[in-house]
Image (cartoon, grey):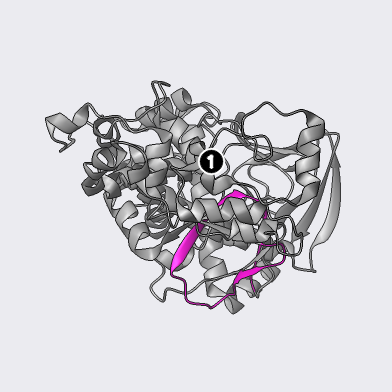
Amino acid sequence: MSGAHPFDLDGQSTDEEIEERIISGEKLPLRDFEFSKHLSEDAMALIEGLLEFDPQKRLTAEQVLENRWVRGETASSKKITGSDKRLAAYRKYKTRIGSAFFRALLSHNDAIHVKTPERISLLESAFHQLDTEKNGYLSTSAIQGKNSSLDTADEDAKLSYSDVSSLLAENMKHRYFPKGHLVYSEGDCGDSMFLIDSGTVEVTTEDGYRKLRVSGDLFGEGAMRSDNKTHSSTIRCVTPVHVLEIPRELFGKYIASDTEAFLNMAERERHRRRERANTILRLNKKCQQQWYKRGETIFRAGDKSGDLYLLEDGEIEISVHGHKVRSLHQGEMTGEHAAYFGKPYNVTAQCVSNSCGVKALPSKVMHDLFRSDPSLRQDFRDLLLRRDFKKALCAATKRSFPTTEQEIRAAFDDIDKEESGEIAFDQLRTIVRQFDPTYNEEDIRGMLDSLDLNQSGSLTWEEFHRIFAMDKEA
């Protein structure tokens, strides 16, 4: 902040002279130093607390991380000449700028996005994503797009990373939680959601679900979207954790003003419900262990056994008419269509690793669980309908399921014969019944509902892209 060594202010001292000053305990003349005059009282107090000679009085690392200045709560733009006037011109667009950053923050872990270096902060990562020209600054007109309402005079002003940090500091608060800290418990009322900047938290629920979340992930968003505003899980810090906290009011504004952010959040919520269903089923003790060798099939399309298979070890390839739908990895399930509907399997599952260890859960046991937990049944149904859509798509296009941006676009266009930018119910029904004529209207409608994130009554390109770019195993 000053460009000077605290024990060598003029930069002329030897190592021995610096050492003598350090061990002498002499009070440093920081407040009389020419290059520290621009520092605020809060910044100066922080430096003095760090350079306190007595270790018992010196600030600890945790105290520093909780310091108001470090968390940005005392930041002022007026210390930088001209920046206060420049930033003031952008404050009326702060929600739009915040929405753009929120969208970029959510996309941090999406499969198709290019990753920035892991050791930079989430906010800086978002800045790099939005700085598509890689020139080190952003213009509000670029953030707001073609329909920007900025005054012509404002459009020439540029926002540096420092400007953006100052502008968003009032909305996105930096928080620190120590190892072992309980952030909130299942059933607590939630007023904020959190994006993990660094560290690991554990998510648990009373029904046995357990999951670790790491840098780039988020938690607490469920309470922002639920009607009762309560958390559906417990969050505890496995390591020291740094987060960005976004309050409910701003979350609502960001989601309402940005379609991509809305779709991202809707898909994340559904993905986590399906993930929970997978976990709960895996915990059942009535599963029977089975082993397969490379090349052996767990089941073939048309087989009539109704077990649900949960992969414990190895890799299984799922295919339709010889076209790959997806690869099944440890912790995932297959056979859900036959187990749920009591129909023959509609895909082939083959072991493609040296060996594959699976647990077979009888269909009757699975339905017993559903009767005791209706929400588990709904989440499982959502999962199988999504997967049956992928199977139907592979059968209709006679290609493996798309994995790249270009392939995802091509697959959508193959179905969207009218080039309307959306897939209506009638189009969906056609490709599903070509794949499986036994599908009834109710289940096809349920399939559309599982894909229709914005509840518009059709599957748009934006929804299709969001679902299958974000989670290839949806």
Q: Is residue 348 above or below residue 312?
A: above
Residue 138, x across and y down, in percent: 34, 30
Q: Which of 35/254 is in front?
A: 35
Left or right for 175, reference 77: right
Q: Residue at x 47, y 71 (%)?
A: 190
Left or right for 170, reference 156: right
Residue 62, x across and y down, in percent: 66, 60
The stretch of residues the image draws in magenta is 178-205
Q: Is residue 287 above or below residue 398?
A: below
Q: Is residue 75 above or below residue 230?
A: above
Q: Is residue 430 visible?
A: no
Is residue 141 highlighted in magenta?
no
The residue that mark 1 highlights is 33
> Tag 1: Cα neighbours inside 10 Å, few (<14), some, or many (≥20)?
some
Q: Say which quarter of the image contains residue 364.
A: bottom right
Residue 186, x across and y down, in percent: 58, 75
Q: Residue at x 41, y 65 (%)?
A: 224
SS at circle 1: loop
The number of numbered discs placed on residues in the rendered structure image is: 1
Q: Say which quarter of the image contains residue 3.
A: top right
Q: Say which quarter of the image contains residue 159.
A: top left
